[in-house]
Amino acid sequence: MPLYLPPAPESAEHCVRTALRSPALRAPRSRESHGAHREDREVHESRENLVPTRPLPVHQWEVGTVVPASAPLVGWRFLLVRDGLPVGTAETRLTPGGWTFSHFGEGPYAASTDLALRRAEELDDTWSPCLLSVPRLYMLTLWLRPVGETGTAEPTAGPVAGDLLVPLAPAPPGIAANRPMTAATLHALVGSRLAPARLAG
């Protein structure tokens, strides 16, 4: 089924497009360009070929701080695509003054996010995707919320029963990547991973 992708704030997208035009910021490159000596013109053209797409709201899962775990909105992340392939990400952050550009990313999460979204489109029913970050485990998860009769996902403080969570690769040890699971299941796994740290503190 097609996913319901919530529209990103215009100011957040504007921040990303402005950052892509800024020579002071190094934009993600394809694997083929890493380590290669390229002329300034080629680098500029490569930057222009990056297309921000599939924006997803980023929520930070505050596991262990409140019950149930909260997941406030902290940013929007865009996949950066070149020639139809994801090569990086661009992230904006919510500040008291509004949306501002945060950083570009070149790690494995671009490809794993793209893969998780394509697999989510093969699921039954219609889902609204978000990204769920667990900073204490350096983990990023695709958060799928069911779309109701209103055509949108119901607002919640955090993952609830009926939601699906897909840990993105690379996932922490003991948590399987690319495998949809319920919020309760992942919450238990995350809690078990954080338990030694809580005891040690």
Image (spheres, grey):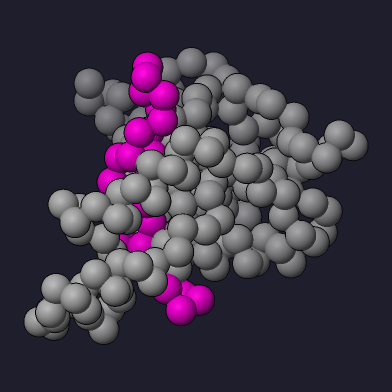
Is the residue 20 above or below the residue 143 in the image? below
Nearer to me, 69 or 153? 153
| Image-based side of 144 in relation to 22, left or right | right
100 relative position to 57: left or right: left
State the residue in front, 16 or 187: 16
Q: How many marks?
A: 0
Quadrant containing the C terminus in the rendered view: top left
Q: Where 178 falls versus 63 (above or below)?
A: below
Q: Nearer the viewer, residue 103 or 189?
A: 103
Q: Is residue 59 visible?
A: yes
Q: Examine the structure image and report whether residue 89 is included in the region drawn in magenta.
A: yes
Whether residue 87 is visible, yes or no, is no
Relative image position of residue 95 (x, y in whole percent): 36, 23
Residue extending furthest front?
Answer: 41
**Coordinates of residue 56 in the picture (x, y in percent):** 54, 46
Q: Position of residue 8 (x, y in %)?
A: 56, 41
Seen in the picture, residue 67 relative to 138 is either above or below; the reply is above
**Which residue shows up at 37% across the image and 17% down it?**
96
In depth, the one of 88 and 48 nearer the eye is 48
Q: Which quadrant of the figure has residue 160?
A: top right
**Residue 162 sits in which quadrant?**
top right
Q: Residue furthest left?
A: 37
Q: Residue at x 80, y 61 (%)?
A: 1
Q: Residue at x 77, y 37 (%)?
A: 152
Quarter assignment of residue 138: top left
Image position, residue 179 (x, y; %): 58, 60
Secondary structure mostly taken by the magenta-highlighted segment of the chain: strand
- In the image, which residues are magenta? 82-111
- Decide whether residue 7 is among the magenta residues: no
Q: Which residue is found at the position 33% from the left and 39% from the top?
A: 101
